[in-house]
Amino acid sequence: MRIGVSFPTTEIGNNPAEIRAFAQGVEDFGFDYLTCIDHVIQKAQPEANDWRAYYTLDNAFHEVLVMFGFLAAVTKKIELATAILILPQRPTVLVAKQLAEIDILSEGRLRVGVGIGWNAVEFDALGQNFRTRARRIEEQVILMRKLWSEKLVTFDGEFDQIRESGINPHPVQQPIPIWFGAFVEPAIQRAGRIADGLLLNPRATPTDQGPEHIRMLRDAATAAGRDPLSLGIDATIYTHGRGKNAIRDDFEAWRELGATHITVRTMTAGYTSAKQHLEALEEARAAIG
């Protein structure tokens, strides 16, 4: 099982030295990967009185692809994983080029987690259609994989058209792994059909949502003629308010359910420095063993 960390994008500030210290500290602790969430624009007031209330203009969200270009240069071996990149709000060919570049700069250390998003405000601001995002993401995945592996691409899709063109350079990985972040049944089934793995809802637990979502993924993979056990599963464990025993118990429970990746998340604790986050992560790493 691989153990990673969620980059605390809203609770680390804007000092490049702090960002570098966090990433290098995580790598030094022996974590396998570092994830980062994606939001481009936020409103001053929350969209809803639920978990989305956290995603307001009061919280800084570092641009994930630019961030990974920086982190590729200041780390040596840790995997960089978007978790998740809201793919349908971005131009497909451009993001394929950007991801290929990150894979090159990191020497093949990129994992791409994508999702359809929930905030129409971002789609409107970026000139994309919120209502077609589910259909579009499937087409985008097909096109990105072709652009990463073929010299010349001809593609006649609903949303993108390309004639005998390609990107250069290609990524190190052929192709870059694509995982889906999915919280509801149709999206989880989509992951089972075409993704390399599933990033579970970070609020899911080994007793609530987690088992059912894993079942949905595996059923969809089987129905699509794929080996369900070949797909990765990434679950989240929060550290805030949790002791070592609780963290260890969750880790073992996720292992029993078949999770291949565990992401440790220190956000929501109100930390403001890399040092505080790293201290919490060091304790969590010791608890997991």
Image (cartoon, helix red, strand yellow):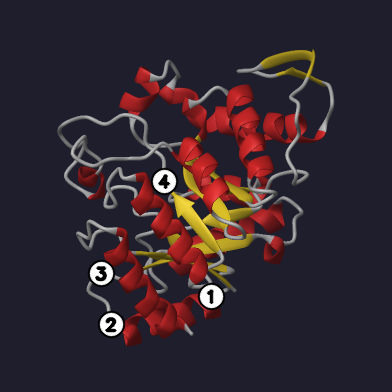
Q: Amino acid at mark 1?
A: Leu
- Contact (CB < 8 A) between labels 2 and 4? no
In the structure shown, which secondary structural element does the residue marked by tag 1 occupy? helix
In the structure shown, which secondary structural element does the residue marked by tag 2 occupy? loop
What number is the disc on residue 257? Answer: 1
Q: Amino acid at mark 4?
A: Ile
Q: Earlier in the sequence, mark 3 or mark 4?
A: 4
Alpha-carbon span between mark 1 and mark 2 = 22 Å
Q: Which residue is mark 2?
A: 243
- In screen coordinates, is 162 left or right of 216? right
Q: Is residue 201 visible?
A: no
- Contact (CB < 8 A) between labels 1 and 2? no
Tell me residue 286's x, y (percent).
Answer: 42, 83
Q: Amino acid at mark 2?
A: Gly
Q: Earlier in the sequence, mark 1 or mark 3?
A: 3
* Classed neighbour count for the residue bearing mark 2: other residues with Cα under 10 Å, few (<14), some (14–19), many (≥20): few
What number is the disc on residue 192? Answer: none
Q: Amino acid at mark 3?
A: His
Q: Mark 1 or 2, which is nearer the eye? A: 2
Q: Which residue is mark 3?
A: 240
